[in-house]
Image (cartoon, rainbow, N blue to C red):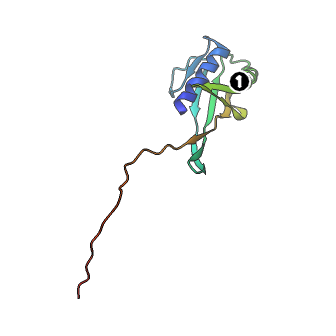
Amino acid sequence: MINAILEAVSISLHAEFGDGYEIYREAKAQGLKEPCFFIQCLNPADRLFFGKRYFRRNPFCIQYFPEDSLHEKEECYAVAERLFRCLECLKVGESWIRGTERNYEVVDDILHFFVNYDRFVYKIEENVVRMDGVSAETSVKG
């Protein structure tokens, strides 16, 4: 599921920003070609909601590394406004997911845009062949 959401975020970013921006999903120690985005899922969680229904929390951080070294913060603020629009809803497979808890901060001239793509999932049990009956014989000594 997380890989499908990562792919949907990448598609949405590419549709909004075009080919001039690189999109990374794996950490690169060096060699980022700016301007670029780095997408990661921070700390997913799974919580039993009711019966076989689970609430899956998927918080994402999209980092933006600006190109303009003279107006980095200004560029980050402009990109954040565009991210609010393009990451509001994503098409994942055949369904749509709404991004919630969207917010951002600029730290060390890098934009950190946070969004959750939470879902309810159902646990499907496997068909297990069950025993029809059990018989046991016991005896008591003495």
> Is residue 121 positioned above or below 51 on the image?
above
- Looking at the figure, which quarter contains the C terminus? bottom left
- For image coordinates 55% across by 20% down, the residue present is 32
- For image coordinates 63% across by 12% down, the residue present is 18
Q: Position of residue 105 (x, y in %)?
A: 72, 33
Q: Position of residue 41 (x, y in %)?
A: 57, 35
- Of residues 90 and 107, the one nearer the viewer is 90
Q: Position of residue 38 (x, y in %)?
A: 58, 26
Q: Position of residue 130 (x, y in %)?
A: 38, 53
Q: Quadrant of residue 72?
A: top right
* Residue farthest toward the top in the current orientation of the protein: 19
- SS under mark 1: helix
**In this rendering, position of residue 64 left or right of residue 3:** right
- For image coordinates 75% across by 20% down, the residue present is 78
Reading the image, the residue beneath label 1 is 83
Check disc 1 and give the amino acid type.
Leu
- Of residues 105 and 98, the one nearer the viewer is 98
* Residue farthest toward the bottom in the current orientation of the protein: 142
Q: Quadrant of residue 113?
A: top right
- Of residues 42 and 116, the one nearer the viewer is 116
- For image coordinates 27% across by 75% down, the residue present is 138
> Is residue 140 positioned above or below 55 on the image?
below
Count of residue discs: 1
Q: Quadrant of residue 91?
A: top right
Asked if residue 44 shows in the view, the reply is no
Asked if residue 84 shows in the view, the reply is yes
Label 1: few (<14), some (14–19) or many (≥20) C-alpha neighbours in 10 Å: many
